């Protein structure tokens, strides 16, 4: 039988373990996020974020793609399925998990010392410690090589000075992974957020990702011991590899936002009557629904393909850019089309469509803008660098 919610039979690609992970995260989101998310979004806050983090840790969702140190050691596909289910609830919740696991924890897991891993990763995996990732600066977003945050030696210590901007989890984090220029190149530092000289004022008045904690990081001569530096990487390769890992989660997550919007529009079209019959019975509405379904499930298939490549150790950064560019761009178009099917009701928080659409405006920009990913693919296709 044809399933309108799985027209290509993608469920058949999943193992029982994959389905168990997906369903666990879906149930958690349905219980803990969906009843409250419209209220949180309207208020522009994410109350109880520390409790939510501990709950996410208890179901193994934090750093779940990492192994050891209390992490679940899940497959890339399973991590992707978790991202899809979280963002089907709200992009802000998926961002909380992505920044924790794919940026902060991943940086420590891949580039940290054994001591750093043992000190931070178990409590981060449990959600007892929230992490953030400081790369973007007020004047340097798409060009991290131009960062001004600087770390200088003072005896055996490091002293960090600078500012980071648009930092998810910043004001609730217990640890920050901060990237800074040094005399030896760009280095990463593990910075406890109670360090003297570090502050994290929250960014207010957002019209996107409103149910998410977003902050600035201000580092005013923050003194750190010698062992605060991530020892296994120097240069932009460090932060960019973390970003590629986080972008992979977005490839899946954006399809969650798209799925919720599509299913909302489909249900609405079956029940909303105009001119004597449900609007789903009109050709123009069916054309919209068909196009939305095609792009949604193509995007999910693309995410699966990239996940299998990541599990095989053969996923390239250019392929992640391919997925992020396509899936976020198509997801936001699906949300916008769903809004037209709902008509005026589409702008109401009684329905999730406009919330997802406005959230995706941020997702479209962060972890690499559309233009950046187009240029990554352009360089890969032509062999010519057009970034400068």
Image (tube, rainbow, N blue to C red):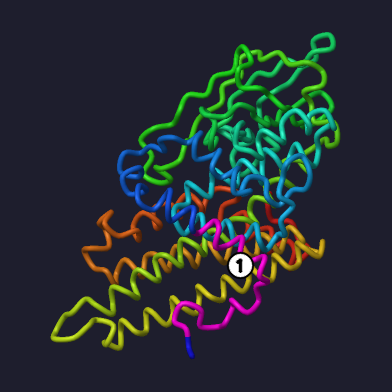
- Left or right for 292, reference 164: left
320 vs 164: above or below? below
Does residue 98 show up magenta in the picture? no
Percent of width and height locating residue 310: 75, 62
Closer to us: 371 or 35: 35
Residue interval drawn in magenta: 3-26
Which quadrant of the figure has residue 323? bottom right
* Circle 1: element type: helix
- Left or right for 354, reference 102: left
Percent of width and height locating residue 331: 48, 65
Percent of width and height locating residue 373: 63, 58
Query: What secondary structure is the stretch in magenta mostly built from?
Result: helix
Q: Residue at x 41, y 43 (%)?
A: 211
Does residue 12 show up magenta in the picture? yes
193 vs 215: above or below? above
Which quadrant of the figure has residue 267? bottom left
- Tell me the residue that label 1 is attached to: 19
Q: Residue at x 67, y 38 (%)?
A: 104
Extreme-top residue of the structure? 155
- Left or right for 55, reference 292: right
- Left or right for 352, reference 48: left
Mark 1 surroundings within 10 Å by alpha-carbon count, few (fewer than 14), some (14 through 19), many (20 or more)? some
């Amino acid at each position: 039988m044809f399933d309108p919610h799985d027209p290509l039979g993608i469920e058949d690609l999943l193992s029982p373990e994959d389905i168990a992970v997906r369903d666990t995260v879906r149930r958690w989101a349905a219980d803990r996020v969906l009843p409250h998310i419209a209220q949180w979004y309207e208020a522009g806050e994410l109350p109880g974020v520390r409790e939510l983090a501990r709950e996410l840790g208890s179901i193994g969702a934090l750093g779940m793609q990492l192994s050891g140190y209390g992490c679940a050691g899940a497959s890339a596909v399973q991590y992707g399925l978790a991202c899809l289910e979280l963002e089907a609830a709200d992009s802000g919740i998926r961002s909380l998990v992505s920044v924790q696991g794919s940026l902060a924890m991943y940086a420590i897991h891949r580039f940290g010392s054994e001591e750093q891993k043992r000190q931070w990763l178990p409590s981060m995996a449990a959600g007892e410690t929230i992490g953030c990732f400081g790369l973007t600066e007020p004047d340097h977003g798409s060009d991290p090589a131009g960062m001004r945050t600087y770390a200088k030696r003072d005896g055996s210590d490091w002293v960090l000075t600078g500012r980071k901007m648009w930092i998810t989890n910043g004001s609730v984090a217990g640890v920050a992974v901060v990237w800074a220029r040094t005399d030896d190149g760009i280095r990463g530092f593990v910075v406890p957020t109670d360090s003297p000289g570090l502050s994290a004022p929250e960014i207010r008045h957002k019209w996107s990702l409103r149910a998410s904690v977003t902050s600035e990081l201000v580092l005013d001569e923050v003194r750190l011991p010698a062992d605060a530096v991530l020892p296994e990487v120097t240069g932009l390769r460090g932060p960019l590899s973390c970003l590629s890992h986080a972008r992979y989660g977005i490839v899946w997550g954006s399809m969650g936002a798209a799925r919720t919007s599509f299913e909302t529009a489909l249900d609405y079209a079956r029940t909303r009557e105009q001119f004597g019959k449900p609007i789903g019975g009109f050709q123009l509405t069916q054309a919209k629904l068909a196009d939305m379904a095609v792009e949604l499930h193509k995007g999910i298939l693309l995410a699966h393909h990239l996940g299998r490549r990541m599990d095989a150790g053969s996923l390239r950064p250019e392929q992640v850019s391919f997925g992020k560019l396509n899936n976020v761009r198509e997801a936001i178009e699906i949300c916008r089309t769903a809004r037209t099917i709902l008509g005026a009701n589409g702008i109401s928080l009684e329905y999730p469509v406009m919330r997802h659409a406005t959230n995706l405006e941020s997702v479209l920009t962060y972890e690499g803008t559309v233009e950046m990913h187009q240029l990554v693919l352009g360089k890969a296709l032509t062999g010519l660098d057009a970034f400068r």
